[in-house]
Image (cartoon, rainbow, N blue to C red):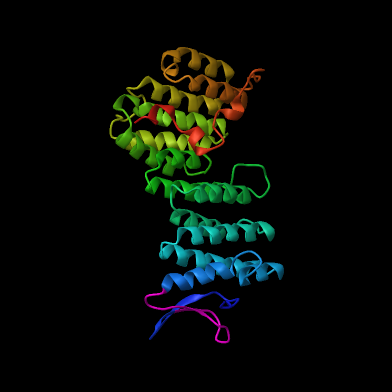
Amino acid sequence: MPRLCRTRLALLPSASGLWWAGHPFCPVVCVVPGRPLAALCSLRNVLKVGSGAGWRYMSQSKHAEARELMCSGALLFFSHGQQNSASDLSMLVLESLEKAEVEVADELLESLAKLFSLMDPNSPERVAFVSRALKWSSGGSGKLGHPRLHQLLALTLWKEQNYCESRYHFLHSSDGEGCANMLVEYATSRGFRSEVDMFVAQAVLQFLCLKNKSSASVVFTTYTQKHPSIESGPPFVQPLLNFIWFLLLAVDGGKLTVFTVLCEQYQPSLRRDPMYNEYLDRIGQLFFGVPPKQTSSYGGLLGDTPRQNCWSHCSSV
């Protein structure tokens, strides 16, 4: 079994193929023409628990070197279509972050998002990876993950046209503009023309339920400006859009009477989705001092997973 060096490995060209090397005094893994996958599998084996350099580093508290080694290996496996081996190494990268109690940094979040983007979208390993990555990125705060990681995941899922899950992650990011642009594409490609207002209405209400007033305003303004079927406003042709516009103004003012009258006047529009009034109950508590109902079920309003959060109106489109 070849031994891997502690420094960052790199692919080096040679007359006989590609050498994956890191140190002149260290044996290397050679990827020769005709036999690249065998060499890659040997790399996977040496990094398995209890038998390889990656885990020796952990026992020596060399977590940074181990992560670099395993991340490089995962990227190489992905480049050769070895999804299982690459996913194994990706999970080891996360385990290193957890064991070393590494502080969250943009560079690490971008590395995790890169590994996520290369995983098979339909694999159970990807689901396990993203769940664990978000938990680590929360830093023990009990939140649903770091906003920057959510943004990076949302962008990847948007590229894959997985709008439902992309939308979930945008909601937990701070990227209102990106969310709006994704929703415009989502609505124009998969929605009904009669529901163009509902795409943005739900997003705004959910951002407000998360006390993210800034992103709620940005997503509304950007969406209404960029959607080709929405005439310039305010005021808008669609009553629901006018309601959302007034609601954002009312949130700034914080006057309960304004909020109450607004919700009463726009009930015909709000009855289009039974969830709207539940969102508004929570918004009333957060911004207008309305006491919570004893039967409040706010914990399930936004869903704990992307699929739970998916907009029901679009699930069959």
Q: Residue at x 50, y 68 (%)?
A: 41
Residue drawn at x 53%, y 71% is 43
Q: Tell me if 123 is positioned left or right of 147 in this view.
A: left
Residue 28 shown in magenta = yes
Q: Is residue 232 left or right of residue 40?
A: left
Foreground pick, 33 / 205:
33
How many dots with numbers?
0
Picture quadrant where residue 178 is located: top left
- The residue drawn where x is 66% and y is 56% is 98
Report the residue that reaches farthest toward the right: 60
- Is residue 227 rendered magenta in the image? no
Is 112 in front, or is 107? 112
State the extent of the magenta-drawn residues as a range: 19-35
Vertical placement of 102 versus 18: above or below?
A: above
Q: Is residue 214 left or right of residue 236?
A: right
**Image coords of residue 84 (percent x, y):** 49, 58
The overriding secondary structure of the stretch rendered in magenta is loop
Residue 24 in view (yes/no): yes
Is 67 in front, or is 178? 67
Q: Residue 309 location, x and y as percent?
A: 50, 33
